[in-house]
Image (tube, coloured by chain):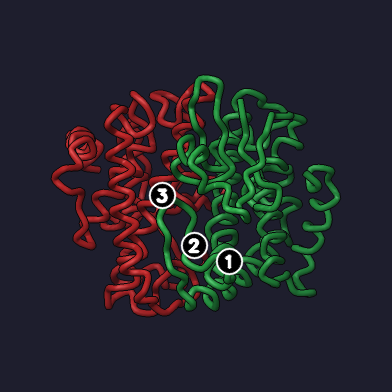
Chain colours: A red, B green
Amino acid sequence: MKLYDFALAPNPRRVRMYLAEKGLEVPSVQVNLRQGEHFKDEFRAENPALIVPALVLDDGTLLTETMAICRYFEALHPAPPLFGTTAREQAVIEMWNRRAELEGFLAVAEVLRNSLERFKDRALPGPRNHAQIPALVERGRLRVHDFFDTLDQHLANSACVAGDAFSVADITAFVTVEFAGWVEEKPREDHRHLLRWHAQIASRPSAQA
Amino acid sequence: MKLYDFALAPNPRRVRMYLAEKGLEVPSVQVNLRQGEHFKDEFRAENPALIVPALVLDDGTLLTETMAICRYFEALHPAPPLFGTTAREQAVIEMWNRRAELEGFLAVAEVLRNSLERFKDRALPGPRNHAQIPALVERGRLRVHDFFDTLDQHLANSACVAGDAFSVADITAFVTVEFAGWVEEKPREDHRHLLRWHAQIASRPSAQA
């Protein structure tokens, strides 16, 4: 088994945080995206989607997609449960994890990839180049703040993002807030529920993974 | 339990197709998005995200997100398994379901919502209005065709989208191909693996749900 990782990228961080919460260690290889190592032939041959994280199983199966990788380990190592146990828990975690991805994480990525010079012609990940679309930057910033508002209101009545217990939804939301810092977007001071929760997650050892 | 549905929208169709495959019937209410029924106060009070599908459980829990709703039913009714059984199956299904959503479904939605007059100022779902961004239309069409290429190549060696067995990844990919027809994008004639698979899924009774 081999995990393609990059220490500075947010999606691999979600996998590392997940593995740390589970107490799992997986052999990994760094793919330096900033130096374009994902475009090299060797990596391209193994992973035509050119993305990290990616997990290659011993039978050769390639798993891309952060949550697919986490679910693989969850099925093999169910304790502690990070995707929930009851039907309701599983569904609520899935919902909040997706909301954090779609309303938060993707909005931050839109700001970043459509504004930074180093993402010129790389406004989307994957094998095809795409030009930046400046209108997505302003829209993305609005969306990030809407997501912070949503999360703050929600956390007024919830210890963690998907209920009382820590889950992958906390990992995604936490990494999203950290990722937003890359484009200089932060929760406001009056987002006190969000800030309380953020400090709590930041104090977990897995936040250093 | 109550499912908010709209017969003409693609995400609710994924839920209906899932339920049909499981042989489940759930009491549902139509929310006519074309007539703006999702903006009415009554719906807004119950579902501030203003989206369908949405499932309200008997304890009042609101589940939005298509896959969260499906996972709720999967946990209660595991047979036949539509999210896989082994760790590898579960992970491969999660990966392909997400690829179909992110590379296919969202690209079609980008084309549709940024080009049709009726989505003026509604380029994204949710409570906030967003202006259309015309540059997303052309990019979205390219992405839809890249997704068709990816799927065709993949289906050359796979009976279904995530292996030999039918799964939610087939539902998402099938509804995505159907949805692409709304913006007049279709697989090419030489996408013969994709067309073979599409005909096979279209012949399932659930495709009429």
Q: Is residue A19 visible?
A: no
Q: Is residue A201 visible?
A: yes
The quarter of the picture where residue A194 lies is top left
- Residue type beneath disc 2: Arg
Residue carrying label 1: B118
Callout 2: few (<14), some (14-19), or many (20+) C-alpha neighbours within 10 Å? some
> Relative to A30, does residue B70 appear above or below in the rendering?
above
Q: Residue B5: image x %, image y %? A: 64, 42
Residue carrying label 2: B122
> Relative to A121, does residue A9 appear above or below in the rendering?
above
The quarter of the picture where residue B195 lies is bottom right
Specify the subunit that label 2 lies on: B
- Residue type beneath disc 3: Glu
Q: Quote the CA–CA distance across marks 3 and 2.
A: 20 Å
Q: Quote the CA–CA distance across marks 1 and 2.
A: 8 Å
Give the residue displayed 32% in from the left and 51% down from the top: A146
* Secondary structure of the residue carrying numbered label 3: helix
Closest to the observer, A181 or A151: A151
Residue carrying label 3: A101
* Secondary structure of the residue carrying numbered label 1: helix
Have a look at marks 1 and 2 and say if they share a chain.
yes
Callout 3: few (<14), some (14-19), or many (20+) C-alpha neighbours within 10 Å? some
Please state if A160 lies on the left or on the right of B2 as rendered.
Answer: left
Please state if B17 lies on the left or on the right of A56 as rendered.
Answer: right
